[in-house]
Amino acid sequence: MAQTIRFAAETAAIQILDIYVPVVANTAISFEEVPLTRPEMAGRIRSTLERYPWLACKEAECVLDSAPPAAQGPVPDAPKSLREVSPACVALMASTV
């Protein structure tokens, strides 16, 4: 199946949390101590999309990775953690710019 880059939607909050929760719970690379809930993640996506793109790498309808805009500067309610985007998504993002 082909991978595509799209804007994340609030409806993808559960799939994004599937990726995000283990990062917060099992690593030291997140500044957050407690994973967000589904409503909190949906709100974070919504408020971020008002000003910045939040990209999601998808295959079929499954989110494989996401790239919040934290590296673009301070964004109210933006994710505090940064993590490495999968190499396949990086290549795909670069080919669509």
Image (tube, helix red, strand yellow):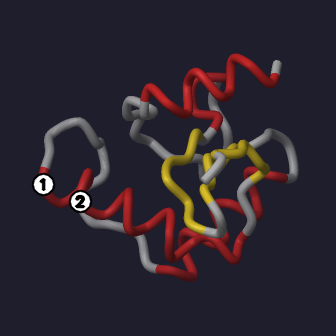
Horizontally, is 96 left or right of 39 in the view? right
Which of the two residues, 92 or 35, is positioned nearer the viewer here? 92
For disc 2, the marked residue is: 22
Which of the two residues, 40 or 20, is positioned nearer the viewer here? 20
**Residue at position x 77%, y 49% from top?**
6
Q: Secondary structure at mark 1?
A: helix
Horizontally, is 52 left or right of 65 in the view? right
- Using the numbered discs, state the Cα–Cα distance from disc 1 to disc 2 in whole angstroms: 5 Å
Horizontally, is 86 left or right of 51 in the view? left
For disc 1, the marked residue is: 26
**Rendering coords of residue 24 (x, y %):** 25, 55
Badge 2, how many Cα within 10 Å: few under 14, some, many 20+? few
**Rendering coords of residue 88 (x, y %):** 50, 31
**Residue at position x 50%, y 48% from top?**
65
Using the image, determine if residue 95 lies above or below residue 49: above
Using the image, determine if residue 87 lies above or below residue 50: above
Which of the two residues, 54 or 90, is positioned nearer the viewer here? 90
- Image mark count: 2
Q: Secondary structure at mark 2?
A: helix
Using the image, determine if residue 59 lies above or below residue 41: above
**Residue at position x 57%, y 24% from top?**
71
Residue 34 image-quadrant placement: bottom left
